[in-house]
Image (cartoon, rainbow, N blue to C red):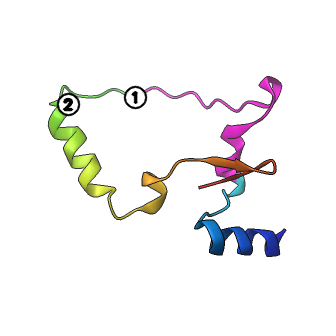
Amino acid sequence: MAILDGILSILYNVEKLGVFDNLMNADKYDNLTQPIGVLFFDKFEFKEMKDHILKKTTDIPRCRSKLIKIMGIWYF
């Protein structure tokens, strides 16, 4: 598999998801992992927060990627 991952990385500029990233993409409903948490937010300006997050994540390729599935394996 490492050879295939290397070839796909060179040809299509993709990166294989890690084990824990891949847990959220279970194929069957029975295998879904859904962590539950409670967060409380103070009121904030949505537009300003959106612009801030977009600015901070421009240099992080994983935050600007879509997931694709190639031969049953998920890639960024």
Task: Give coordinates of residue 13: x percent, y percent.
Answer: 58, 67
**Quadrant hosting residue 44:** top left
Quadrant showing the N terminus: bottom right
Q: Amino acid at mark 2?
A: Phe
Nearest the viewer among 32 and 37 is: 32
Which residue does the image show at 66% across and 39% down from the upper left? 24
* Disc 2 to disc 1, C-alpha distance: 17 Å
Helix or strand or loop: what does disc 1 sit on? loop
Say how many tags the image has.
2
**Quadrant hosting residue 25:** top right
Q: In the image, is residue 1 part of the stretch drawn in magenta?
A: no
Nearest the viewer among 13 and 59 is: 13
- Label number found at residue 46: 2
The residue pinned by badge 1 equals: 39
Q: Amino acid at mark 1?
A: Leu
Which residue does the image show at 79% across and 34% down from the upper left? 27
Task: Give coordinates of residue 28: x percent, y percent.
Answer: 81, 28
Which residue does the image show at 40% across and 62% down from the upper left? 60
Residue 45 is left or right of residue 57, and the answer is left
Q: In the rendered view, tell whether residue 37 sits above or below residue 63.
A: above
Nearest the viewer among 46 and 37 is: 46
Which residue does the image show at 51% across and 29% down from the upper left? 37
Lower position in the chain sequence, tag 2 or tag 1 = 1
Residue 22 is left or right of residue 13, and the answer is right
What's drawn in magenta, residue-wise? Answer: 20-38
Label 2 Cα crowd, 10 Å radius (few <14 / some 14-19 / many 20+): few
